Image (cartoon, rainbow, N blue to C red):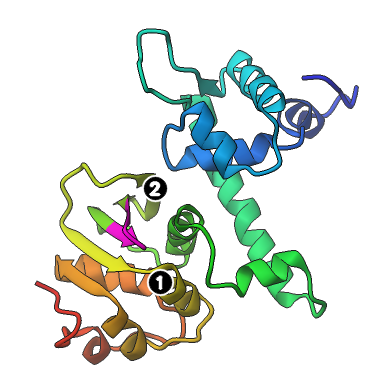
Amino acid sequence: MSRTYNKDCLLAHALDLLGERWTFLILRDLLLGPQRFGDLQAGLPGIGANLLSKRLKELEQADIIVAPTSNETGAGYRLSPQGEGLRPAIREMMCWSIEYFMERPESSPAHECIYTDHLEPDSVALAVELFARYCPEPDLSYVAHIYIDDFPYTLYYMNGEMVTRRGADTPAVASITTDVATIMQAFRKELTLVEAKPRMKLSGHDKVITHLLRCIVHAEKHAEKDLAPTAHAAVV
């Protein structure tokens, strides 16, 4: 922590700890699971190795992340329980950003980011988690896989909350295979459910697939007839 607000305020103290440039983006990337130093740097164009090392050390000293030990060959940095506790705050900030920039009339890099079909799969997978908050199913619990442009992710849904992780090693009850463009267009209400389903491969538990489609396709209230299997997207 190189600078301080010197203010007797809990928000100021939190910003003393987390307000440096790149810190929240490092935490965002770790929300999806452990990352090695090189992977973090590759996913954050513009950050130098020295600055990344400094930010990681600061977060480790604050017990927000856990660094790999010398015995953990190939392991990455990961969130500590305290770091994981920042997930709701980061999600809220991202949701606020989406709503704010979509409503702004002027063009901006943030606005263009929302309207591109060329985001990284990590960003889109995390967005599925964000939008799950608008489709609460508190009595539904499941583990599902989603493959976005061949990148695998696992979705854990419990108590009305979704958590997304990289990889698909955990057994799952349902699976969706699709691409960045399809999901982004569905998020932006440019595809109806009938239009989106032929661009997806769906398999697994019927109720889970129904819920996942609601999290992704926002153009309409989903009718049961639209959620039924099709020749191109069978739910098995």
Percent coordinates x, y for residue 43 in the rendering: 56, 43
Q: Over which residues does the magenta segment extend?
A: 146-152
Residue furthest out toward the top = 70
For image coordinates 46% across by 74% down, the residue present is 181
Quarter of the picture holding the C terminus = bottom left
SS of the residue at dot 2?
Answer: strand
Residue toward you, 40 or 218: 40
Find disc 2 in the rendering and name its residue.
163
Q: Is residue 36 left or right of residue 138?
A: right
Q: Magenta segment, principal secondary structure?
A: strand
Q: Is residue 14 above or below residue 53?
A: below
Quarter of the rendering containing residue 45: top right
Q: Marks 2 and 1, Cα distance to the nearest angstrom?
A: 15 Å
Residue 103 in view of the camera: yes
Q: Is residue 92 left or right of residue 157?
A: right
- Residue 139 appears at what percent x and percent y? 26, 58
> What's under tag 2, amino acid-wise?
Val
Q: Residue at x 27, y 84 (%)?
A: 198
94, above or below 16, in the image: below
- Within 10 Å of disc 2 (Cα), the crowding (few <14, some 14-19, many 20+) is some
Magenta stretch: residue 151 in it? yes
Name the residue: 48% across, 40% down: 31
SS for callout 1: helix
Residue lying furthest left = 236
Look at mark 1 in the image and give the residue it sits on.
Answer: 216
Instruction: Give me the disc on residue 108.
Output: none
* Quarter of the image where one finds residue 40: top right
Q: Quadrant of the N terminus?
A: top right
Residue at the image position 38 percent from the left and 23 percent from the top: 75
- Residue 56 rendering spot, x and y as whole percentages: 61, 23
